[in-house]
Amino acid sequence: MGTTTMGVKLDDATRERIKMAASRIDRTPHWLIKQAIFSYLDKLENSDTLPELPALFVGAANESEEPVAPQDEPHQPFLEFAEQILPQSVSRAAITAAWRRPETDAVSMLMEQARLSPPVAEQAHKLAYQLAEKLRNQKSASGRAGMVQGLLQEFSLSSQEGVALMCLAEALLRIPDKATRDALIRDKISNGNWQSHIGRSPSLFVNAATWGLLFTGRLVSTHNEANLSRSLNRIIGKSGEPLIRKGVDMAMRLMGEQFVTGETIAQALANARKLEEKGFRYSYDMLGEAALTAADAQAYMVSYQQAIHAIGKASNGRGIYEGPGISIKLSALHPRYSRAQYDRVMEELYPRLKSLTLLARQYDIGLNIDAEEADRLEISLDLLEKLCFEPELAGWNGIGFVIQAYQKRCPLVIDYLVDLASRSRRRLMIRLVKGAYWDSEIKRAQMEGLEGYPVYTRKVYTDVSYLACAKKLLAVPNLIYPQFATHNAHTLAAIYHLAGQNYYPGQYEFQCLHGMGEPLYEQVTGKVADGKLNRPCRIYAPVGTHETLLAYLVRRLLENGANTSFVNRIADATLPLDELVADPVEAVEKLAQQEGQAGIPHPKIPLPRDLYGEGRINSAGLDLANEHRLASLSSALLSNAMQKWQAKPVLEQPVADGEMTPVINPAEPKDIVGWGREATESEVEQALQNAVN
């Protein structure tokens, strides 16, 4: 979609009026003019009555026909940038405004929205307790999920070994050469006290992993032990560490396979049949991180196309709610998926998204647009809106979108999505997740010196947000098909009772991660006669090879291996079940009583500006994905563009006027930034004398 510049001549008075009006709302004149044009066009296209039009036509007949002499206007170097500032609707402006709002403001608003009525709270607690008790009492946790739970509990992120393991997993993903990998293994593995884990866990998988890591740990750490011969040390030095590197790589693959359904979509579909027979559904995701090149994006596009064909054939006409679906990552479809490349994203990425969605419609399988980093949320909403108004997709309810409860904008995003569904006359599938990029969101805000965090700094605030958002989704069943992705027994139980007992197919569904949530949802999915809750659960099933799974594995272990995670805490027999299934609203109220206010940020996570404590203030950055910040920046650039700066020697004595030369903006030769004059030899001499005397 190309763009063009259309200009109109304005008298100085009108120009000043527009400029003043724009400054009052902290926007640029171009933004205001653009909004006015869109508003007027809407009225014209809707055939609204416009009383000013006749007057305009009458006035036009009486206008002087004298040609207007062209005038040289001063060059505006930032005009093109100003024209790229996107006009926002009221609902979209509200989303942007909430991006980094203080947690005290956000949480206090959420508390009442998330609060359960006393009867529902009591029912939810009772059901959550039953689910958690049964889950904990599964003495022989069999299958992949049990293995992973045991692993997370044994190699907790709070232990030295757990941190070393996670560092190793993430680092191995990024290290291409063997020598550096070996050096890393020597550094990380030799210090891990793996032996302390042996015999503590009933899971065979954890002990097997422990023995393997212990074996390599002994080899690496005993290079210089006196009881080993020098020859053995030489052998280990020559060939031991590459073998250890392979061993650790294999151990990481073994762990990762617990989270991956199959290496190919055909394998994944075959492996899914067992649980599908029990009533589970699947949403497949082709593993891989963001595309870095056009070739990467094309490869992902082909992978998604092949997957949709395979899933569509396997669906066999079951439809978007009963059959399998697919999740796609927009960053995989374009190497420059960011606000800075907005036009390219709309021109190059959008046709790929539309093509995949039309293919999914052909098979009538659901297609979900996955959530990613916070700075990509609003551009993904623009893509979604455009998709929803495609004539070829009219009346089809298979378009899905993922929202993250840990983002402060989430409730407002729901308001926008409800409005979008209403305007586009469809029912949107909305998957509500807690969010998997928390650590990177915190780190990015700190590195860039932004005014706040886009996410909550306390896990319990995210739990409150999740309940508040779940209520909003359940309130509009005609416009939203809610998909609740959670492994938390209390969250599950609360939603079960909030939705009511009169469940009907297509009302809503639960979701869980493959390798994480099956033991919990085996109590939920199935007939009431079999002691189940008769509610559907869709398993989010990653598909990919060993080479693509490590980044996903690290995210899953960081997310669920944390000490605040339900998956981790359920395996801790020392933690009382009542505490495990506590109502998050009550937990926040207790915190508020202790701290004097609801929503106080985590005490160990200072705001980015306070990152260095009392020593110094962190340098402030600018969020170039935020439309409000871009509008303010554009306004400031335009207002200062006409200022012509002068640079000339400054001495204690008066300096003579000399010839000034223009200083040209190297990025825009037409832009004269100002005028400058070099110092003469006598002025340099005078400056030196002034410095000495």
Image: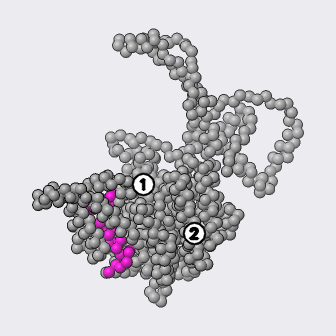
- Most distant residue in the left direction: 226
Rendered image quadrant of residue 668 = top right
User: What amino acid does circle 2 point to?
Assistant: Ile
Tell me which numbered mark, 1 or 2, is placed earlier along the sequence.
2
Where does the C terminus fall, quadrant-wise? top left
Image height of 617 relative to 505, above or below: above
Question: Which residue is identified by label 1?
Answer: 440
Residue visible at 38% across and 45% down?
610
Residue visible at 34% across and 78% down?
141
- Residue 152 is covered by the magenta coloring: yes
Q: What range is drawn magenta here?
A: 140-168
Question: Which residue is identified by label 2?
Answer: 308
On residue 686, the disc is none
Could you tell whether 522 is left or right of 476 in the image?
Answer: left
Residue visible at 57% across and 69% down?
308
Residue 48: where, in percent of width, then height? 79, 55
Q: How many labels were placed on the picture?
A: 2
Residue 195: where, in percent of width, then height? 21, 67
* Res 279 seen here: yes
Residue 591: where, in percent of width, then height? 37, 61
* Res 369 seen here: no
Nearer-the-camera pick, 580 or 111? 580
User: What amino acid does circle 1 point to?
Assistant: Ser
Task: Please tell me whether the stretch drawn in magenta is mainly helix, strand or loop.
Answer: helix
Residue visible at 48% across and 83% down?
278
- Residue 575 is covered by the magenta coloring: no
Could you tell whether 501 is left or right of 357 in the image?
Answer: left
Nearer-the-camera pick, 376 or 133? 376
Label 1 CA crowd tier, 10 Å (few <14, some 14–19, many 20+): few
CA gap between label 1 and label 2 equals 31 Å
